Amino acid sequence: MTKARLIDTHRHYWGVGWDPVQRVESYTQGMYGVSLEEAWYRYKQDKDGSVMMKQVEEFDIDTVILHTVDSGLAYPGDTPTDIEHINKFQCEMAERYKGKVYSLFGIDPRRPGGIKMFEKAVKEWGAIGLSFWPIAGFYANDPICYAYYQKCIDLDVPVTIHTGAQHASGLLNKYGDPIHVEEIARDLPDLKIIMCHTGFDKYPSDWFWEKAVIVASCKPNVYVDVADWQREYTCDVLADMPKFWYKMKTMRHVLGANKIMFGTDMPSYKMGHVESDIKLTKQWVKIFRNLPEEGKKYGATFTEEEAALIMHGNAERVFKV
């Protein structure tokens, strides 16, 4: 029997100088207790994506879609590296690992000249869509975003909108509220929208998740991914598999399996509990590669066809990969 394809629709690559120093510090020292020097050291270990590809192979994942996070305007001083360079570098990496890696174009819509850059990224660099990270300080339904959404429609590519909570100083979670996606989906029914993380909350809240499911259930052009869920539902401290399967059953029942996508959000910002996150992600992959069997343990019945949609079918259709 041929092994099913597994597409990680939500992966990152972090390069040196791709984020403001304040953001790196807030994650390293504030959240993980890792020094800034160690964080930079880890960044420098993967200059061309080869380390990432070894990890992807180790995870037993076939294809990854890279998201570019533009967090520069969330902090004083901006990002040391120009956002155009970051996007082009990542698209070149996708070309280097063609068929295994794809890249989205990411930018803060408040930056000047972004629309032309986005179009160039799709037409010349091979970007397959747009990535917005509203928690940098803008609402996804802000009028400034709509020119980008229209360009997505014109180019026939989707937009991913990161939703949910962030435990990092300097960021405001109000911008990650999934409810802001609803207006966009209503105004632009031809726009394909993926809500990253399905409004993932930080334990024990389910507030944003519930909003995300409601929005996706009411709007046929809205999809969701489950990236980063493994760090809550499969970790040793907070393991709550019954809750995870309750959410999966709910989403399958309310949204349909044709709206759910697999994702990891790795590589753990390359500065935190790397070893434990690798272990958790391996468990995460095992769950989705054996979705019908794993679900039965918790009373969640998924067919092989539904599993195939979540693992790769939806991504192939929406992202055209």
Image (cartoon, rainbow, N blue to C red):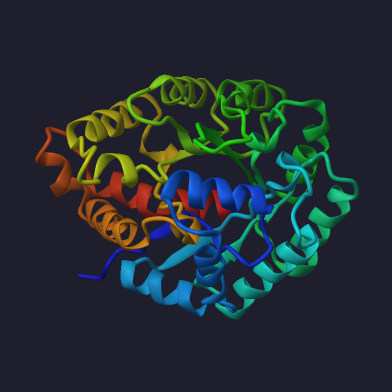
Residue visible at 48% across and 26% down?
A: 212
Name the side, left or right, on which 96 lies relative to 254.
right
Residue 6 drawn above or below residue 304: below
Q: Nearer the viewer, residue 195 or 267?
A: 267
Q: Say which quadrant the N terminus sits in.
A: bottom left
Residue visible at 43% across and 51% down?
A: 33
Image coordinates for residue 89, horizontal then vertical, percent: 70, 70
Name the side, left or right, on which 143 lies relative to 186.
right
Image coordinates for residue 80, horizontal then vertical, percent: 76, 60
Q: Say which quadrant the C terminus sits in.
A: bottom right
Q: How many numbered callouts?
A: 0
Q: Nearer the viewer, residue 247 or 27?
A: 27
Residue visible at 36% across and 42% down?
A: 229
Q: Would residue 60 be visible to someone looking at this image?
A: no
Image coordinates for residue 268, horizontal then vertical, percent: 44, 55
Residue 118 drawn above or below residue 161: below
Q: Nearer the viewer, residue 19 or 8?
A: 19
In the rendered image, which quarter is residue 145 located in?
Answer: top right
Image coordinates for residue 202, horizontal then vertical, percent: 40, 31
Q: Would residue 66 be visible to someone looking at this image?
A: yes
Name the side, left or right, on which 264 lies relative to 99.
left
In the rendered image, which quarter is residue 193 located in?
Answer: top right
State the residue lying farthest toward the left: 297
In the rendered image, which quarter is residue 320 located in?
Answer: bottom right
